[in-house]
Image: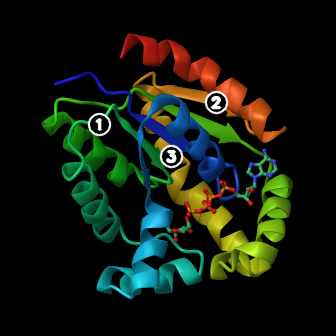
Amino acid sequence: MQKQLNIVLFGPPGAGKGTQSERVINRYSLTHISTGDLFRKHLGEGTDLGLQAQKYMDNGKLVPDEIVIGMVEDKINHTPNTNGFIFDGFPRTVHQAKVLDQILKLANASISVMILLNVPEDELKNRLRLRAKISGRTDDQDEVKIQTRITEYRNKTLPVASYYNLQDKLVTVDGVGSMDEIFGKVCTVLDPLYEMA
Ligand code: B4P
């Protein structure tokens, strides 16, 4: 099997994961797995999975691991012959990270790097307030939901960074600045890994 470049793009809500993912996919021809986008797609189509996720997302809470993991596993298993994956918003708990390692191991692959986009809380809130005006996303619409998402991140998601740090795979990138500047820093991390893959 070809060697894959598998990236976890990580950070709090509003850090720019979705924004940077689009650029990374174009440059390195990777397969995008955004759990938030997948849930919103299911929601739009009115599937059972979408309806199960909705009550958590609407309140800014994490969707339970068993729902998220099944969906990601299905997507990985239905994507043969890829250069690699960019995981955007996944894993969000240490349990999700451990299961992802197992799924990739079965495919003789592994995570190459985790990039953490570091953005202060005030800036995150400003970005989400701005996006609320155009996104139509229920979880962007009020301060309580935004705060819940940030608290969920601190309590349940941030430990995932330590998990990858223990494997020497964590790289932190300053997520404040123009989208192009940040993309430049992300490429500085990924270009050498891409050449090796
Ligand atoms: P997500 O869809 O992942 O949403 P998010 O964390 O808000 O990040 P997103 O990628 O959309 O925003 P971005 O930072 O790019 O998750 C939504 C919900 O789904 C979760 O709360 C949870 O309920 C559920 N969920 C998803 N995955 C899950 C999982 N694995 N386990 C459990 N539950 C899960 O951008 C934000 C804004 O900032 C944009 O408007 C953008 O234009 C702007 N921006 C980006 N970069 C900027 C920059 N450099 N300067 C200024 N603005 C910038």
Disc 3/disc 2 C-alpha distance (Å): 14 Å
Labels 3, 1: front one: 1
Q: Is residue 53 visible?
A: no
- For this rendering, which residue is in front, 169 or 15? 15
Question: Can you tell which quarter of the image residue 104 is in?
Answer: top left
- Quickly name the residue at label 2: 172
Way the structure is coloured: rainbow
Disc 3/disc 1 C-alpha distance (Å): 29 Å
Q: Quadrant of ligand 1?
A: bottom right
Image point (63%, 18%), residue name: 188
- Quickly name the residue at label 1: 82
Labels 1, 2: front one: 1
Q: What residue type is disc 2 on?
A: Thr
Q: Secondary structure at mark 2?
A: strand
Residue 162 coordinates in the image, percent (x, y):
50, 36
* Contact (Cβ within 8 Å) of mark 3 with mark 1: no
Image point (22%, 59%), residue name: 74
- Quickly name the residue at label 3: 159
Instruction: Please give the label number shown on residue 174.
Output: none
Image point (86%, 56%), residue name: 122
